[in-house]
Amino acid sequence: MGTQLVCWRCGASLKKVPLPLIRLAQCPACASDLHVCRLCRFYDSKLSGHCSHDLAEPAREVDVANFCHHFRPIAGAFRPPEKTKQAQAATQFEALFGLNTNSDDPSQIDSSTDAKSKFDALFKDK
C-alpha cells in the first residue's frame, strides 16, 4: 500500500496493527473495529448497499466488524467531521471580534471594552 492506513473513525495511525487486518482487529487509539465496510476500498455511502463490489452482499452495519471476503483496506477512509452551521457562525463571530471563547485561558479573551471599541469602529464614519 502506497500510503499509511489510518483509523476510519478517529484518524489514528494503524502502522503498528499487523496486516492483513483480521476480523477482530481494533484501533489502538479508539478501539473501533477495523475490518469494517467504512475502511474498505469498495465502501460507497452513495450506494444503497454501501458496497461497489459486484459479488459482495449488502452490509447491515458499515461500522461493525464483518466476515466479508472482499474487504480491502484503504488509506483515505478517515473523514473528519464537518462543522455545523452554528459552529461556523460562532467561529466567524469570534474572528470578527478577536475572541477565543473556546479557550480556558482568560488572557485569550479580549476585555469587553476592547470588543466594544472594535464593534464601534465598524460603524464609525471615516
Image (tube, rainbow, N blue to C red):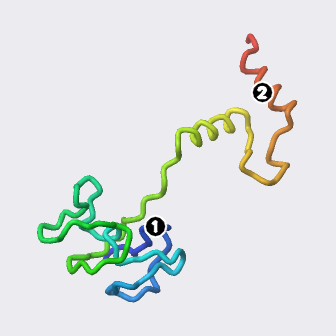
Amino acid type of the residue that numbered disc 1 sits on in the rendered structure:
Arg
- Of 119 and 59, which appears nearest the observer? 59
Percent position (x, y) of residue 95? 67, 38
- Residue behind mark 1: 9
Percent position (x, y) of residue 75? 36, 70
- Vertical comparison of 8 with 68: above or below: above
Q: Mark 1 or 2 closer to N-term?
A: 1
Q: Residue at x 46, y 86 (%)?
A: 16
Q: Residue at x 85, y 33 (%)?
A: 112
Percent position (x, y) of residue 96? 68, 33
SS under mark 2: helix
Percent position (x, y) of residue 102? 71, 49
Q: Quadrant of residue 117?
A: top right
Q: Residue at x 26, y 52 (%)?
A: 46
Q: Seen in the image, is 80 located left or right of residue 115?
A: left
The numbered mark at residue 118 is: 2
- Of 3 and 55, which appears nearest the observer? 55
Q: Quadrant of residue 109?
A: top right
- Of 36 and 105, which appears nearest the observer? 36
Mark 1 or mark 2, whichever is nearer to me: 1
- Vertical comparison of 122 with 34: above or below: above
From the image, which quarter does the C terminus lie in? top right
Q: Are marks 1 and 2 in contact (CB under 8 Å)?
A: no
Disc 1 residue crowd, few under 14, some 14–19, many 20+, Cα 10 Å: many
**Disc 1 and disc 2: Cα gap in Å?**
41 Å
Disc 2 residue crowd, few under 14, some 14–19, many 20+, Cα 10 Å: some
The numbered mark at residue 122 is: none
SS under mark 1: loop
| Circle count | 2
